[in-house]
Amino acid sequence: MNPFAIHSQITLPFSLSPIQTHHKTILTITKRAIFLKPPCFNRFNYRQNPVSKVVRSSMGKDNNVLDGKEAALLVNTCITRNLPPVLSLEQGLDIIKDAVDEIKANPPSCSSGMFRFQVAVPPSAKALNWFCSQPEPSEVFPLFFVSNENENPTYKSLSLGRSRGVFGIGSAVNFRGPPPHASENGSAIQRYLRAESTSSKAYGFLDVEFDTKMSTIKHQSGSFYLFIPQIELDEVEDISFLHATLAWDDSSLCNFTEAVQKFELAFDQARHSCVNNSSQLIHSSLSKFNIAEEHTEMVRLNALLLDRKNLEARTLKLEDPSSFCNQFSARLSPSLLIANNMHQKDDTNKLDYLTKDFPNINALWASLIVEECTRLGLTYFCIAPGSRSSPLTIAAASHPLTTCIACIDERSLAFHALGFAKGSQKPAVIITSSGTAVSNLFPAVVEASQNFVPMVVLTADRPPELIDVGANQAINQVNHFGTFVRQFFSLPPPCDEISARMVLTTVDSAVSKATSSPSGPIHINCPFKEPLAYTPRDWNRKCLNGLDFWMSNAKPFTTYIPLQNSLTCNNTNGHMTEALELIRVANNGILVFGSIHKEDDMWAALLLAKHLLWPVIVDVQSGLRLRKYLSSILDRKDILFVDQVDQLLLSDSVRDWMKADVIIQIGSRITGRRISQMIEQCCPCPYIMVDNHPSRHDPSYIITHRIHSSISHFTEFLIKSCLPDLSNKRKEFIRGLDMTAAWEISNFINSEKSLTEPYVARKIFENIRCGSALFFGNSMTVRDADMYGSNWVQCTHNASLMISSGLPCHGVHVSGNRGASGIDGLISTAVGFAVGCNKRVLLVMGDVSFLHDTNGLALLRQRTSRKPMVILVVNNHGGAIFSQLPVANTTDRSILNQFFYTTHDVSIRHLCLAHGVKHVQVQTKTELQDALFASQRENADCVVEVESGIDTNVEFHSNLRNFTRQASDHALSILSKLSVEDSTLHYKISKMEYSLYRVKLNAPTTAASRNSNTTTSYREGFVISLSLEDGSIGFGEVAPLEIHKENLHDVEEQLRFLIHAMEGNTIDNSLPLLKSSISSWIWNNLGIPPGSILPSVRCGLEMAILSAIASTHGTTLLDILHPQKDEISKNPSPVQICALIDSYGTPMDTAFIASNLVAEGFTAIKIKVARRSEPDEDIAAIKEVRKKVGPHIVLRADANRKWTYDQAVKFAHSVKDCCLQYIEEPVNDENDIVRFCEETGLAVALDETINCIRENPLRFLEKYIHSGVTAIVIKPSVIGGFENAALVARWAQQHGKTTVISAAFESALGLSAYIQFARHLDLQNCEMQKLTNKISAPITSHGFGTYKWFNEQVTEYSLNIRHNPNHNCVEADAIEAGQFLQKCRLNPDIVVRAFLADQVKEYQLAVDSGGAHYSINVVETGESIDGTMVVFLHGFLGTGGDWMPIMKAASISARCIAVDLPGHGGSKLKHHQGIDGSDRPDLSMDVVVDIVRKVLDNLTSEKVILVGYSMGARIALYTALKCSNKVEGAVIISGSPGLVDEDSREIRKAKDEFRASTLVSNGLRFFTEAWYAEELWASLRGHPHFKQIVNNRLQHDDLLTLGKVLSDLSIGKQPSMWEDLKQCKVPLQLIVGEKDTKFKAIAREMQTKIGHENGIANPTPVVEIPDSGHAVHLENPLAVIAAINQFIKRGN
């Protein structure tokens, strides 16, 4: 059904053919202008009558078939190509045909091979529909449908039209026969074959023998008949995939040309038989399955299992029961149909009951009505008990294809029918008795009408003579629902004088009205006279005249055909051209996704957002507000979903800024009131509304263009007509705002210890499984989900499959009753929705809504034709929505409780118990998590009740709004300050450098061990300078201490890597937001996991970046972190300093030092304790200090986790009168901290405890919410930078804890940045206290007293820290500190050495090997002091340049060399003696290793360390084993010693030869698309630089040699090295990615074999690199650098 509706006169472009008199057809001519491409089937030259060819070709050449081994060999050559997602099944077929034509134009040279194409298509592509639409007779075999439903599928589930499954047509590979005898090495084959999995599936039957010539099948134990279809549609949850397979084998199957011809024959039939809506076809097809031969199970196998040595059903069932399907139908030949569970087995003819004698005319009419409904695809009947409706009830319950459900409450029943239609997109049929039973349907009818949900209402009635005469249960039911039904039909009382055709055509017309746009409810009133039971009463069969043809088939009497006419009138073009031009010229366009009901429309909306690249505002009911991703949360997504816009608009300044010049809204309704207000404030601007109904949805009267179109057709039109918006300035601005609000909301919600309603809104989606659906109640639950629902959740589908879809994410089917937005009937609707959508459903609702529809629990209890569902009830004991409205502020509480909140104490648990429904009550976050997790996996319905309270809910919502508003204002002020009109948001980095400094200290640092022999102490570290293209420079300091895990060497390696990675990169103005902005930048711009950067390096890098941004704007770091108005920013910004004492002396010594510090003006002192074995002297020291300095000085103690619990308690009790502000880390076990607080009453500050936080810090900090933990001491260089520090500080401030920023003995340069950061946090804390109406806390003294340790300065001038007499304390001024950092100049006297970029040399080495002459390209950098030389060998398609970032890092201590292997990069084959260019030299493993060895001989006479990845790893390992005199050690990254089993070697050899052939025939771009589509690269495909990495692989120009390398170096050809490993004497290190399951297993097995026979004591290390898959050196290079460095230093 198409589209852009603009009314016009219609002229049919064709003449109508004669209509058969026995079967009425109505052509509905819709007056719409449609922009359509020419019919797709005109694109190809379809062959006529190809039956004989097809049957022959489908079975292979001369009916030959492959045995299991031959099939496995062929299947393993398969190259899969992923194609971009499409909007329809037809488009999917067309794009596959284009891909096949591309192959056809450049055929591969291999005599055998297999191509597989796959494309993601929308969920409306139904396998069963497609199967049922195949022509009779078919021209292609086999044809099959296999159900994907696992829970006892029946033929009735098919009639409901919800069954997901697989449709296949044709046979690309066909094989049968008894399996070969088992061999001893079968398990070894499977070990390796299973690891290299493919998506190809084989279908067929086990334990059968199929005679292709006779078209017969019989049981034969051990035999099998299997095939791989040519075209296949597989419905996966949330998404469907269309596959096509092209296979050939010249010797046994067919040649390539014949394979293409076979495919085209199957394609022709498949393309012609595409249907969009074939529920009627399903019904008519089901009647044919009763002639099928029965077979209990059909199998679906991974095609790589085809060479199994045992393919018996019994064995396979034990290993993989999911391979067996017991609902299927397969047409194997024109005369052989096999099926199971596709029809009612005890029913030989489904129309028999229509030919029997009906006892009376009432029964006949009722049966006709029900039968016609089922023929129209309406098989779900919702029946209310009643006498007058008995004929309809009996007819529906007796029909073999209907599924019936009953409920005593007609209101619940009607809502149930409404829910079914929402889930299935087709109407349910409601049957009720007369009287008020009809009136009880009214609320659901209203909701259906308002929300355009189809519904068929059959109401029984008294005959007309009993109306208005006082007859019992008789009311006037004519037009009972008024304008809320699309049409009212009033049947006469059944009478044999009226043709039965009238009944059928009335039903046909009614259903057409219900399902045509605008869809909605229809009402058929059915008066019945007595007898109502099946009491015999004579009737005249003449009323059935003209029904013979109808009774001989299973089609409806009248078929309504909506014709769409493509018009080209100027008026139509003018309207659409105008709208299109507005979209094209938009500068600030916004895409709004409102309520979207169909999964296909969600799919189309996602593709529209992907193409248009406008910022997208998403309503929760669009299904795309709650999304599941495969990629990292840090990914800078191409589609900018502005999920937090509702909360951003709390800010007046954001609301004023957020203007659009064009708005496109997809779907009518919007939940968020502030979003609607924003759209209204953008007026006047073009506002384009798109929805597939003609009704008006314009409450603000601002829509300028109303397009009546399906979302799919509008998307298709726009994709063809508009280019993406690639401008990003405003988008990045919006991204920064949204990121800030998301961070703030998440932080605030997750930081709250108690279970809150916004927390529930976030967690429900995080816990819902892929393939499930959500149904929201009205009032607060849907609003909370819209405002606070998670916007990123990890997808749990198969990663490789979902990545291959080409979509960044997928949505979750969301529904609700938002038409009239009532709270009635929600349970009933959700239960119906679960039946209709055939998914697990989570219903989220409030307690009042639950109580309003407790009769819905009776429907839940029936568990009819659906999966388990969970009802989550947020019970705040009343209507909390009113607490959020103005009425709550002006109305007496007693009135609110009684008339608005309707406060209650009803037990939901007892209600559930009464209905036999499982009930779980939760009161904590953990209990909620456990309940949701368990309920989503159990096979039972469950009600989860969440305890809440109205008052606490109001307070939390209010605080959350305030905090978010403040954060939004703050973010806007930062971005506005740093963004000048018409200037870029990005600044290019010209260079990064560092200098190593060494300065003298007055005393050892408090982290250093005390050594009596130490006379002079020094502090060493690095100063980073980051230069931007505009000349601005930022500075940072990296100075690890003993408390850091890293040392200077580790730090310098990472700095050298970062210098290479940063050069030419850009930084942007969003980084100072510190709300995951820097982590996101590190991942997206540098391509490295943020957690892989050492904490001190991360801190120094952030310092340099932020100061560079400040420098380019001529301001301070404080000013970009916390912008102030100009007049305010000039005021002093004091930061108080806490002095530090390292108390190794006597108590008197400590007191003397303290008194001197007080004399200098310090008002806060921290004393290091726990320096001795017992706390007694520390106790004495504290007492003496307090006595010496008096009561007004703030004293802190720091035990650094060195005391046992008992020692700490002793100390606390002994100094309780000394008024310590707190003690830092008193106990050595963090689990004892809260216990210590409770026992001693002494306040505690956290320090070391938070330093180890890396993942999910808020969850970690939850246990320290205790009031006894009063402070958090944050060392930015230890915790990992300013961004991590800001997160912890925000948590601390939210919980009223003091935030202390502390230095780790950084120089004045680092202190200047910390001082500004501390001032920012102080100002932020003041603002937070104002928001929460708390009394201002005392000014915090920060831990910067370490400045007194420095005897020398790193900078030319000193940082000004002084006593301020006005404040009577020692302090620093943050503005002065900012100016100090801006003008920073290093003291040349303290610089040990400055960074000197290693020269990179690139040269060629001439090598002769195997009768050929090669010029090998070599890249070299670095010099070695001790002679260490590391040689890097890349993988297939790589170059030596892949190693450059790692080489830059390693070159600090080693000479690093990377070699371009033959056929790659700059290495060239110069001459091959005696052979022309068409024949390439041997490039086997021995030859390549010989080349590598000769290169090494050219480079050095000493031994080298080899580092190899993948193919390079195999070469490195072989070299190490065969040339141990030349190899000192080898690092094997993602490498394998080869294959042992001959069968698996043969398979891999064939696969690589076919790949090589394809590479040469079709080029690198085609090859890389298929190469990187393999499962091995699933992790790499999620890397932000994946496209750039692949583009780098396209630079090779010697494809012949490259193909030769792939073939000759195949793991199937190279000698196996497993036995050689046992003799290995060369030290090895094995590196694998934690996500690389296959190579992790190989590495573990290698570890057990290496040096086994040499008795090596130290096992070979296996290093698992986190956050990475196969390509670890590209995905997490810093971790690889650390591992290689560790290996190089192993001898030291």
Image (cartoon, grey):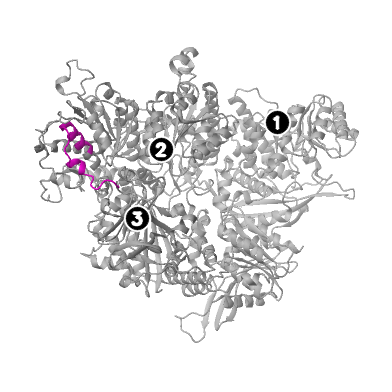
Left or right of 352: which side holds 659? Answer: right
Comparing marks 3 and 2, which lies closer to the viewer?
3
SS of the residue at dot 1? strand
Q: Would you say residue 355 sits in the magenta stretch?
A: yes
Number of the label disc, if any, that sits on residue 1269: 1
- First of labels 3, 1 by sequence position: 3
- First of labels 3, 2 by sequence position: 3
Residue 1115 image offset from top left, x and y in percent: 61, 40
- First of labels 2, 1 by sequence position: 2
Q: Residues within 10 Å of mark 3 (few under 14, many from 20)?
A: some
The image quadrant where one finds the N terminus is top left
Label 2, label 1: how many angstroms apart (C-alpha)?
42 Å
Number of the label disc, if any, that sits on residue 1632: none
61 in relation to 693, above or below: below
The image quadrant where one finds the C terminus is bottom right
Q: Is residue 973 visible?
A: no
Residue assigned mark 3: 295
Q: Count how many numbered circles sit on residues in the image.
A: 3
Residue 1027 image offset from top left, x and y in percent: 62, 52
Give the quadrant of residue 1155.
Answer: top right
Label 3, label 2: how many angstroms apart (C-alpha)?
39 Å
Residue 1182 image offset from top left, x and y in percent: 84, 31
Of residues 307 and 1030, the one drawn nearer to the viewer in this rendering: 307
Q: How crowded is mark 1: few (under 14 residues within 10 Å), some or many (20 or more)?
A: many
Q: Give the range drawn in magenta.
A: 345-370
Of residues 1646 and 677, the one drawn nearer to the viewer in this rendering: 1646
SS of the residue at dot 3? loop
Number of the label disc, if any, that sits on residue 814: 2
Left or right of 985: which side holds 281? Answer: left
Callout 2 amino acid: Val
